[in-house]
Every structure is written in structure tokens, then in C-alpha cells.
Amino acid sequence: MAEHHATDHAGSPGRRRFGWVAAPLVIFAGLALMFTYALKTGDPSRLPSALIGKPVPQFALEPIAGLVDDGRPVPGIGTADLARGRVSVVNFWASWCVPCVQEHPVLLELTRRTGVDLYGINYKDKAAAARRFLGHYGNPYRAVGADGNGRTAIEWGVYGMPETFVVDGRGRIAYKHVGPISLEALETKVIPAIEAARAAASG
């Protein structure tokens, strides 16, 4: 009987240790299922964002070296630019990103149709490549910051290029779109998110 009793005590800590090991695995599996669902449904905007409704992260990015528009240097971007009382849109992009090429005409259409202040954050890119990209496809951005080390993208919770955020006039994230914006997504998601943020600001 004593031997059986000792076995019970030895097994109990083992079970507790297993619980500590299993809990993170269960959480990870749950997150993995959410990501898999979002990718399989073809709607990456379903990926969760902990930043919705919260202020944008504190950041300050230098401009892309040598980038000009109509002969004037294009400025960089920081947190203060997104809290000036106007709804704005922030787009993370890179010249080496194929979906960014596909998305770019939609960004031009976005600014044409809404007049929103569109800000670009250029992710882990070379200045010359970024300048060529915008020179070839057009520059829809009011300002462009160079996120050379990717730190700002991490702070914004960016999964990959491109990603786009609608920011209200007080600098809070109102909407996040993961992946390239299609014309359909522009009509059904992004523009309505901009209009909703504008309505909330004026209400």
C-alpha cells in the first residue's frame, strides 16, 4: 500500500507540469486555427488585431532619401501626423512586394475618390528601389517614412506586405486591412471604414 501511495504523489506533480506545458500549446493551436481560417476563406482581413480602437504606436520615421514630388522633398511620417483631426490611411508597402504592385492602382483610386490623407511606410527597402517604384507607378502618398529595420511594422502588428490602416482624427486605429486592397475591398470595406470614421468624428 505504501508503494502505491508514493506513486500517487510522484504522479501528481507530473500532471501539473504537463498542464503548464499544455496550456501554451492549446493557446497557440487556437491562434493557428484562426489564422488558417482567415487564409483559407480568402479574407485575410479576418486576422485579429489587438490595436483596433487604440492609439497608433509612438513612432517617427525619416523620409525616403532623395524622394521628391513636383520638385519638393516628400516628408517622413510620425505619430503626430495621424492626430490632426482628419481621418487618414496608413499603408505599409515595399518595392520588392509583388502584391504591392497589384494594389498600387487601387491606392491611387482611393485618394482620388475619398481625398483622404494617405501615408506610406516603406518596409525594409532600399531608397533607390523605393524611388523607382513610386516614379514608375505614381506616388499617392502625402508623406512616406522609411522603416529600414522593420521596427515600426512590428509595433503596428503588421503580418506582411502590404497592410493598410484607417486612423481616426484623434490618432486611433479604426480599421485594419491585411493583404492587398482589391477594388471590391475598396468599395465594401475600406471606403466604408473611412466614411464611418469621418461620421464618428463629426457626430
Image: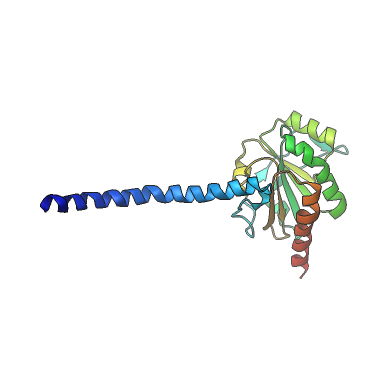
Residue 31 shows in the view: yes
- Residue 134 percent location from the top left of the image: 81, 36
Image point (75%, 29%), residue name:
129
Residue toward you, 104 or 188:
188
Quadrant location of the C terminus in the rendered image: bottom right
Residue 55: name its quadrant. Answer: bottom right
The residue that appears at 83% across and 33% down in the rendered structure is 135
User: Which x, y percent locates residue 89?
Assistant: 75, 51
Residue occupying image coordinates x 30% and y 51%: 15
Q: Quadrant of residue 150?
A: top right
Above or below 150: residue 119: below
Q: How is the image coloured?
A: rainbow
Image position, residue 144 (x, y; %): 75, 42
Looking at the image, the residue that sits furthest to the left is 2
What is the number of callouts on the image? 0
Front residue of 10 and 197? 10
- Is residue 86 in view? no
Q: Is residue 81 above or below residue 151?
A: below
